[in-house]
Image (cartoon, rainbow, N blue to C red):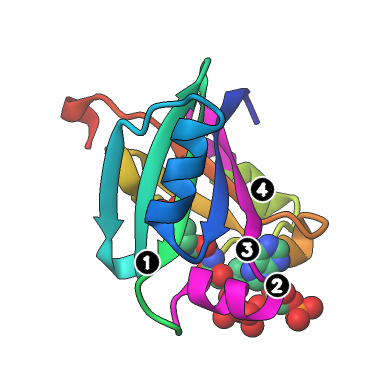
Amino acid sequence: MELSHIEHIGIAVKDLDKVVAYYEKILGLSCYAVEEVKDQQVKTAFFKVGQTKIELLESTGPEGPVGKFIEKNGEGVHHIAFAVKNIEQALREAAEKQVQLIDREPRRGAEGLSIAFLHPKSTFGVLTELCEKKQESEE
Ligand code: CMX
């Protein structure tokens, strides 16, 4: 699988506004986008640190993946997302190597990226996201 960089780190938070204020006022970053991803029951806020982004995730429903995560673990690092050259190929390779896929096919995530998750039970406890920025014409 060809990974180019860490695309983002996802962090589960209880109160998006409060945490955005921390990243802006203490760490000196600037939030450049806030977006709700309805099918994932999350509201997200993005920051750039070099080539990598920080994605803050506030749950919009207790049964969503972030709501369940916070209920069990509290706030903290939720997932790591790697940029891949070819997401379909990367998923095929992972499946061939017996990695459990959460998404068998890529789907559209925040910022219009093509994304898919690997199950933390087969990635040594780290929920892993693969992302590819498709050209408009490829979608
Ligand atoms: N990191 C590590 N382990 C995790 C985890 C995470 N983020 N989320 C859940 N788990 C573990 C749980 O601790 C639990 O472990 P045990 O069986 O040892 O108790 C196990 O996975 C099952 O967890 P669960 O709470 O019962 O939840 P589900 O099985 O219903 O769902 C998962 C788990 C990973 C399949 C689900 O959270 C998922 O599909 N995640 C991918 C989508 C997602 O996270 N979307 C939010 C971000 C969207 C975005 O970035 O835009």
Q: Image height check: is 54 above or below 136? A: below
**What secondary structure is marked by label 3?**
loop
- Residue placed most toward the observer, 33 or 89: 33
What residue lies at 59% left-to-right and 61% top-to-bottom?
Answer: 101
Q: Where is residue 124 in the image (x, y as percent from the top left)?
A: 83, 56
Give the mark toward the camera: 1 or 3. 3
Q: Mark 2 points at which residue?
A: 73
Q: Kindly report the distance in space between the C-alpha atoms of the residues bearing marks 3 and 2.
A: 7 Å
Quarter of the image with the C terminus in it: top left
Tell me the number on the disc at residue 96: none
Give the mark toward the camera: 2 or 4. 2
Q: Mark 3 points at which residue?
A: 75
Q: Position of residue 35 (x, y in %)?
A: 26, 49
Q: Mark 4 points at which residue?
A: 94
First in sequence, mark 4 or 1: give its number: 1
What residue lies at 77% left-to-right and 61% top-to-bottom?
Answer: 122
First in sequence, mark 1 or 2: give its number: 1
Residue 76: say if magenta. yes
Q: Kindly report the distance in space between the C-alpha atoms of the residues bearing marks 4 and 1.
A: 23 Å
Q: Mark 1 points at which residue?
A: 40
**What secondary structure is marked by label 4?**
helix
Q: Splitting the image into four quadrants, where does ligand 1 fall?
A: bottom right
Q: Say what amino acid the circle numbered 4 marks.
A: Ala
Q: Say what amino acid the circle numbered 1 marks.
A: Gln
Looking at mark 2, is its residue's CB closer than 8 Å to ligand 1?
A: yes
- Residue placed most toward the observer, 7 or 53: 53
